[in-house]
C-alpha cells in the first residue's frame, strides 16, 4: 500500500517565528520523517519526531523542557496532525507510547496518558492509578482531531503560516 499522496507531500524545511511571543518553530519533512522543533530565542525547548513507514506512522514522545501544561505539546501535535492528514491517506495507523520521561510519578504518567487520549488516540489498556508506567496507543490517522490550546502562552499555528526554506 502506498500511503503517500506524493503530489501533496510538502518535502522540505519550514520555519515560523512569532516575535511578539518570542518563539519560533522549525519543521523538517521528508518521505520518511517529520521533525517539529519549538524554540525560544536560540534554545530548543520541545520537539516531536515521527517516523513515516510504508503502512504506519510512529510518534516519538514529545521531548524537551519547558512549562508543563503551557500548550507547547498541543501546538506540536496539532501541526503534526495537520501536515500528516494533508499528505497521507487517512486509514494509515499512527502509534506511539506515552513514555515516562523525566516525570516518572503516577501523576506524570496520568497527564501524558490523557494528553494523547485528548487527540483521539486509543490505548491498549486503561490508565492504572496504582502504577507509573508507559502506555501504548494507536489510531487511524483520519480519526485524530486538532485540539484547542491555552493561547495564554502560544497561539494556534497553522502549517500554511510557515515559510518554506529549502526543497
Image (cartoon, rainbow, N blue to C red):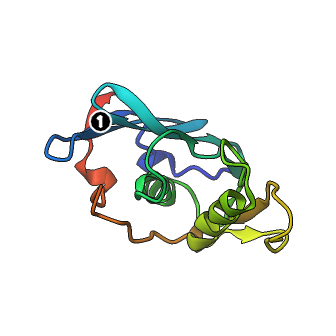
Q: Position of residue 95 (x, y in %)?
A: 72, 56
Left or right placement of residue 22 versus residue 1 in this view: left
Mark 1: few, some, or many residues within 10 Å (few <14, many ≥20)?
some
Reading the image, the residue beneath label 1 is 15
Q: Residue at x 27, y 52 (%)?
A: 160
**Quadrant housing residue 140:** bottom right
Left or right placement of residue 33 versus residue 161 in this view: right
Vertical relation: 121 (above or below) 12:
below
Vertical relation: 125 (above or below) 38:
below
Viewer-nearest residue: 76 or 140: 76
Q: Residue at x 71, y 45 (%)?
A: 54
Name the image quarter holding the C terminus.
top left
What is the secondary structure assignment of the residue under circle 1? strand
**Quadrant housing residue 24:** top left
Q: Position of residue 149 (x, y in %)?
A: 38, 66
* Residue 104 is at least partly visible in this image: yes
Amino acid at each position: 500500500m502506498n500511503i503517500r499522496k506524493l503530489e501533496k507531500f510538502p518535502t522540505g524545511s519550514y520555519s515560523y517565528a512569532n516575535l511578539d511571543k518570542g518563539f519560533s518553530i522549525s519543521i523538517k519533512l521528508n518521505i520518511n520523517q517529520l521533525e517539529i522543533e519549538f524554540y525560544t530565542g536560540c534554545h530548543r525547548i520541545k520537539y516531536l519526531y515521527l517516523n513515516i513507514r510504508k503502512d504506519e506512522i510512529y510518534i516519538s514522545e514529545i521531548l524537551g523542557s519547558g512549562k508543563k501544561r503551557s500548550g507547547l505539546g498541543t501546538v506540536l501535535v496539532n501541526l503534526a496532525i495537520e501536515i500528516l492528514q494533508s499528505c497521507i491517506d487517512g486509514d494509515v495507523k499512527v502509534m506511539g507510547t506515552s513514555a515516562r520521561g523525566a516525570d516518572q510519578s503516577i501523576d506524570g504518567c496520568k497527564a501524558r496518558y490523557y494528553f494523547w487520549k485528548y487527540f483521539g488516540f486509543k490505548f491498549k489498556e486503561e490508565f492504572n492509578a496504582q502504577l507509573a508506567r508507559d502506555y501504548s496507543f494507536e489510531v487511524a490517522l483520519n480519526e485524530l482531531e486538532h485540539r484547542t490550546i491555552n493561547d495564554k502562552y502560544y497561539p494556534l499555528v497553522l502549517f500554511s503560516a510557515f515559510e518554506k526554506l529549502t526543497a
